[in-house]
């Protein structure tokens, strides 16, 4: 049975195929991509934020601060409005932002360990659920507009927060990193308690709105994000549904992501234009991830067209 390929539209196929199957299909890698119809529109350009590289054993730990990596939605407070990393306006209840200071703040909207899905659902809703927002904390780890290096900015942050009238606004606890062994022990303890990993800030670093080694992440496995370009039809036991995703990394590397999906996810795959998170074991000489496995949809990142 042959499929006709259309970009982001239902396939024209024999009537015996289910409606779900009709919505799968594949698109050519060079086709024009369209954002899912249900995606939130961007209100402005995405905020320019400092992004982390990956910590590797042997990297110097002198002058580094370490904190827990919170598994939530990256949030940027510009002094008046909350934004996602992708540039979407966050519709928070008035009480949540009423006591926030005028200073820009970079942090994570966090619902607790193991509750990433709840955080995403709450933040993305255009009709704020008051009870759900009471479950969130804004974990603030930096002050992007504050002069000085990270150690100096941290001192200002500790004076600025907490605020008595806004207990949901929390300065991220930071401690000095010492050795790789102690860092690994802290990672193991954090993961056992349900945490995602650790973050390391170089104390002497300025806030540079780009991905750089002054900010490092440490997790028990390698993971990264990629944008969905196409749905590749399955074969054999995956016939008539998605077999793999054709994805592209922020660096422009394209590859097929075909493992780690449940049957439900293969029947209703991540939309073309959306972002997904995947786990992998190192990279090839050409820079492609080895043994890449799907982890989840990055609903906290704006879909792109």
Image: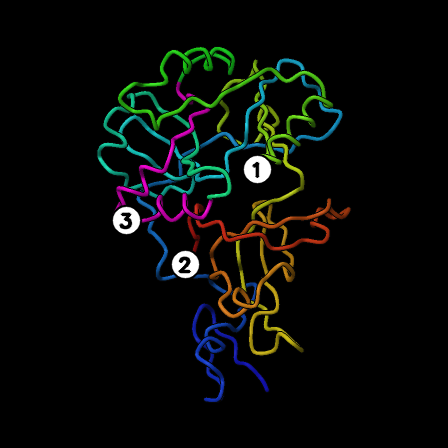
Location of the C terminus by quadrant is bottom left
Residue 155 lies, with reference to residue 106, above or below; the image says above
Residue at image position (44%, 36%) is 74
First reached walking from the N terminus: tag 1 or tag 2: 2
The residue drawn where x is 35% and y is 24% is 104
Q: Verify CB contact (< 8 Å) between mark 1 and mark 3.
A: no
- Mark pair 3, 2: CA separation: 18 Å
Report the Cα–Cα distance between label 1 and label 3. Answer: 27 Å
In the shown orientation, is residue 32 left or right of residue 122?
A: right
Q: Where 267 falls versus 208 (above or below)?
A: below
Q: Residue 208: give x, y in percent of width and height.
A: 50, 24
Q: What element does badge 3 sit on?
A: loop
- Indicate which disc residue 35 carries: 2
Going from the N terminus, do you reach mark 1 or mark 3 first?
3
- Which is more foreground, mark 3 or mark 2? 3
Identify the residue at the far front of this view: 193
What range is drawn magenta here? 116-145
Image coordinates for residue 171, horizontal then vertical, percent: 42, 21
Badge 1 is on which residue?
196
Q: Is residue 162 above or below residue 275?
A: above
- Marks counted in the figure total 3
Q: Earlier in the sequence, mark 3 or mark 2?
A: 2
Which label sits on residue 252? none
Image quarter where the N terminus lies is: bottom right
Nearer to us of marks 1 and 2 is: 1
Q: For the residue carrying disc 2, how many other residues have a C-alpha within 10 Å: few (<14), some (14-19), or many (20+)? A: some
Say left or right for 195 vs 144.
Answer: right
Is disc 3 surrounded by few (<14), some (14 to 19) or many (20+) residues within 10 Å?
few
* Residue 209, x across and y down, in percent: 48, 28
Query: How much space separates mark 1 and mark 2, taking CA atoms?
Result: 29 Å
Q: Which mark is residue 126?
A: 3
């Amino acid at each position: 049975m042959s499929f006709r390929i259309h970009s982001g539209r239902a396939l024209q196929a024999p009537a015996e195929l289910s409606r779900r199957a009709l919505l799968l299909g594949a698109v050519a890698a060079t086709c024009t991509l369209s954002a899912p119809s249900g995606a939130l529109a961007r209100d402005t350009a995405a905020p320019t934020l400092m992004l982390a590289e990956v910590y590797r054993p042997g990297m110097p730990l002198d002058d580094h601060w370490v904190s827990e990596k919170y598994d939530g939605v990256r949030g940027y407070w510009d002094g008046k409005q909350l934004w996602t990393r992708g540039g979407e306006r966050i519709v928070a209840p008035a009480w949540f932002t009423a006591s926030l200071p005028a200073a820009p703040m970079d942090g994570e909207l966090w619902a607790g360990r193991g509750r990433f899905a709840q955080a995403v659902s709450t933040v993305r809703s255009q009709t704020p659920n008051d009870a759900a927002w009471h479950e969130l904390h804004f974990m603030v780890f930096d002050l992007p507009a504050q002069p000085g290096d990270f150690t100096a900015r941290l001192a200002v942050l500790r004076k600025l927060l907490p605020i008595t009238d806004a207990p949901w606004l929390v300065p991220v606890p930071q401690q000095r990193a010492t050795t790789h062994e102690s860092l690994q022990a802290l990672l193991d303890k954090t993961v056992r308690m349900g945490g995602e990993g650790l973050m390391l800030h170089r104390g002497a670093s300025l806030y540079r709105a780009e991905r750089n080694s002054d900010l490092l992440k440490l997790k028990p496995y390698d993971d990264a994000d990629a944008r969905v370009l196409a749905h590749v039809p399955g074969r054999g036991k995956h016939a008539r549904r998605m077999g793999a995703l054709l994805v592209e990394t922020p660096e422009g590397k394209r590859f097929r992501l075909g493992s780690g999906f449940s049957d439900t996810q293969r029947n209703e795959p991540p939309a073309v234009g959306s972002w997904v998170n995947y786990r992998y074991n190192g990279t090839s000489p050409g820079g492609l991830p080895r043994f890449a496995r799907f982890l989840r949809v990055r609903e906290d990142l704006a879909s792109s067209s």
